[in-house]
Image (spheres, helix red, strand yellow):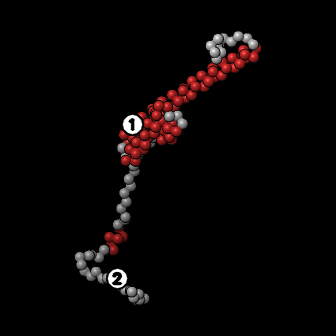
Amino acid sequence: MENFSNEVHPPPAYGNQGYEQVNQDYKKYSSPQSTVVTIMPEGPPVRDHIIWSIFNAIYLNFCCLGVIALVYSVKSRDSKQLGDRNRATGYGSTARSLNIAATVLSVLVFIVVIIIYAIQISKIIEMLQNKQSGGQSDYPNMYGK
């Protein structure tokens, strides 16, 4: 158990161990030195398109292009964190191209599917109207007659 006392101990004395007393004139004329470093960015920030890639990977993943775009977006973000601006720009550009392809192809497939469904529904409606009117249909019935 340690014994704590209320005694105040003076700091250790260094004596004359090679230290010089600072001259008062030196203190009066010296000012603190400061250095200002201005870092200018090398251009526009590198875009990694991570949000667009996540959206494409979840919703518009045509032929896995969204997942591949997400991989390149993550590579771009990692390269940007490591300070490799050229590699980050390249990966970001590839992610952007893959995102464009995934978005356009997915929207086109969606439009084609809507058109096919619309055509099929119109044929079914036409067939039902012909049956109700009692007329002969251009379409064969289920027995092929």
Mark closer to the observer (1, 2) = 1
Q: Which residue is mark 1?
A: 90
Q: Position of residue 86 (x, y in %)?
A: 36, 39
Task: Give the residue at x 49% y 38%.
Answer: 57
Asked whether, in this view, residue 86 is left or right of residue 126, the answer is: left
Q: Quadrant of the C terminus?
A: top right
Left or right? Give the position of 130 relative to 37: right
Judge whether residue 37 can be spotted in this image. Answer: yes
How far is mark 1 from mark 2, CA to CA?
61 Å
Within-10-Å neighbours for mark 1: few <14, some 14–19, many 20+: some
- The residue most toward the right is 133
User: Which residue is farthest left?
Assistant: 18
Position of residue 36 measured from the top left corner of the image (x, y, whole percent):
38, 55
14, 54: nearer the viewer: 54
Query: Amino acid type of disc 1?
Result: Gly
Q: Residue at x 33, y 72 (%)?
A: 25
Q: Amino acid at mark 2?
A: Pro
Is residue 52 visible in the rendered image? The answer is: no
Residue annotated with mark 2: 11
Q: Quadrant of residue 43?
A: top left
